[in-house]
Image: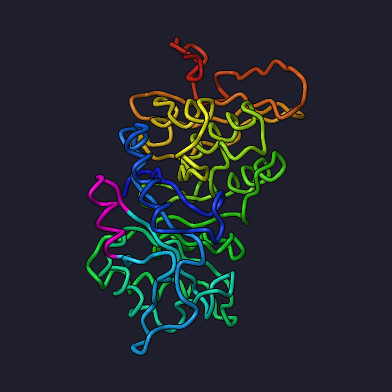
Amino acid sequence: MKHGLCRWNSYNHFPCMLSDELIRQTADAMVSSGLSALGYEYINLADDCWAELNRDSKANLVPKASIFPYGMKALADYVHSKGLKIGIYGDAGTLTCSKKMPGSLGYEEQDANTFASWGIDYLKYDNCHNNGVSPQERYLKMSKALLKTGRPIFFSLCEWGQDNPATWAANIGNSWRTTGDIKDNWDSMTSRADLNDIWASHAGPGGWNDPDMLEVGNGGMSTEEYRSHFSIWAIAKAPLLLGCDIRSMDNETFQLISNKEVIAVNQDKLGIQGKKVKKSGDREVWCGPLSDNKVAVVLWNRGSSKATITANWNEIGLQSSTVVDARDLWMV
């Protein structure tokens, strides 16, 4: 699997407000904006509320006809026709978190086969109403069911980091949440960055720590705060999961999420998660090795006033005699 993947998710901006039209328009915007050419390739109706509360007579999940009148297969075909992939949401319990649609606990194979028959490429699998069954057991069942379909489906474990999935999920899925849900504010974003950083050594090619979606462009933080947000997610090799309305984003948002070189740091083939290596009050240094003997460094001022931050060579993995060509990837 690609390093963490770049994608768009409906939930941050459109919680339980999904529609066939929204997904099609977002797929169109992903292509017309040029984001798909930068590696953003998944369109995910990946959170709650897309299915009817009751299964059909054969116990299959049923898309809500009122918002998906043509069904999921037709929608997936449309997204695929744009050269993109499509994701969906499920839950490892009896109900999803909204209690508005069924979970997949006890229906793992049936639902996996349904997803595969629709052409789904990605499954975000939540953790609500789980009857006290261990997450290792519940997530493993769906993992096996997805593999059994024969269709490559990226499996994103949304266990909220409660049972330290970074220590066991690499053999089950492709990414795992290390934190609770993010909110569009500075304190929420920074706390998730810190929690995710704890598990840096457990991530790598094929399995990624996930500190939740990007809030860039949703309006709750300043441009510079969003720049920090995107930079830390990029160096941490976190999935770059856009959560704004890309149909109507402003130019500042587009410039942040379309920085080719920052995206390249995230997608670097070495796949080693960068981490915090120095902290002095609000001043921090984060770094991580890249391929071709390169190093990515984030000098992060988490305070409210200007500050000078110094990173010594030995702190970022370089010999003191090393001569480097250093530049700011945000200076465009």
Please report the residue visible at 48 percent of the width from the left and 58 percent of the height from the top. Answer: 18
Nearer to us in this view, 99 or 318: 99
Give the quarter of the image for residue 147.
Answer: bottom left
Colour setup of the view: rainbow
x and y percentages locating residue 199 in the rendered image: 56, 49
x and y percentages locating residue 244 in the rendered image: 52, 42
Q: What stretch is highlighted in magenta?
A: 73-85
Q: Which residue lies furthest to the bottom in this view?
A: 57
Q: Is residue 101 above or below residue 153?
A: below
Please report the residue visible at 47 percent of the width from the left and 51 percent of the height from the top. Answer: 9
Q: Is residue 99 above or below residue 15?
A: below
The tally of labels here is 0
Q: Quick check: 181 left or right of 81?
A: right
Q: Quick check: 132 left or right of 3?
A: right
Q: Does the magenta stretch include residue 81?
A: yes
Please report the residue visible at 35 percent of the width from the left and 50 percent of the height from the top. Answer: 24
Nearer to us in this view, 193 or 116: 116
Q: Does the magenta stretch include residue 315?
A: no
Nearer to us in this view, 155 or 75: 75
x and y percentages locating residue 231 in the rendered image: 54, 31
Look at the magenta stretch and give its main secondary structure.
Answer: helix
x and y percentages locating residue 299 in the rendered image: 61, 24
